[in-house]
Image (cartoon, grey):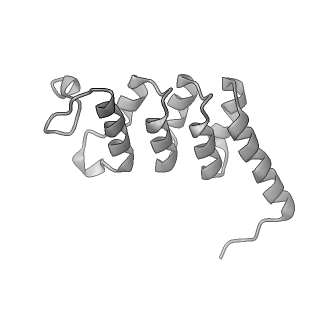
Amino acid sequence: MGKRKTPEERAAEEARYILAQGACTDDEFEPFFTDSHQAIRNTAAMNPDASPAVLARFAQDRFWSVRVAVAEHPSTSRETVLGLLEESPARRGVVHHAARERLEREGVKFGEDGLPEAAAGQ
């Protein structure tokens, strides 16, 4: 079992959650790209004020839940969503499927290979 958090650590974590939810500018998002707490990064990635540039950076997060939040965010650019797709069927997981669902809702057609038809011939 892990070490219990002190009241100070819990308070600091709660403060970071509040800041992640309230960030409005790209500069205000900066500390969350490297926050040690995955859920705080996820909260920041779901923030409705996150810009396409902020979301592109969160798309590189090592945890899938943050990348899924990016795929589902309405401000994420098409280029970023396409970058979340996996070419190898063996590597396709929840992130790939979230990105695919988003793209299909936007009218993108997928081929039998599981990739967008326009990209399949490239």
Look at the image and tell me whether residue 85 can be seen: no
Location of the C terminus by quadrant is: top left
Residue under the point 65% across and 52% down: 37
Q: Quadrant of the N terminus?
A: bottom right
| Residue 110 position within the rendered picture, expressed as x and y whole percent measured from the top left | 20, 33
Image position of 108 with respect to 7: above or below: above
Residue 10 can be seen in this image: yes
In which quarter of the view is residue 7 placed? bottom right
Q: How many marks?
A: 0
Give x and y (percent) for residue 112: 13, 38
Q: Quadrant of residue 19?
A: top right
Say whether residue 103 is left or right of residue 10.
Answer: left
Question: Is 79 or 14 nearer to us in this picture?
Answer: 14
- Residue 88 image point, x, y percent: 24, 44
Residue at (49% x, 49% y) in the render = 65
Q: Nearer the viewer, residue 100 or 62?
A: 100
9 vs 109: above or below: below
Most distant residue in the bottom direction: 1
Residue 120: percent from the left, percent from the top? 18, 28
Residue drawn at point x = 54 percent, y = 36 percent: 58
Q: Nearer the viewer, residue 62 or 29?
A: 29
* Image-based side of 100 in relation to 65, left or right: left
The residue at 16%/34% (across/down) is: 111
Task: Tell whether 119 sits left or right of 67.
Answer: left
- Observer-nearest of 43 and 37: 43
In the rendered structure, the answer to whether residue 91 lies left or right of residue 47 reads left
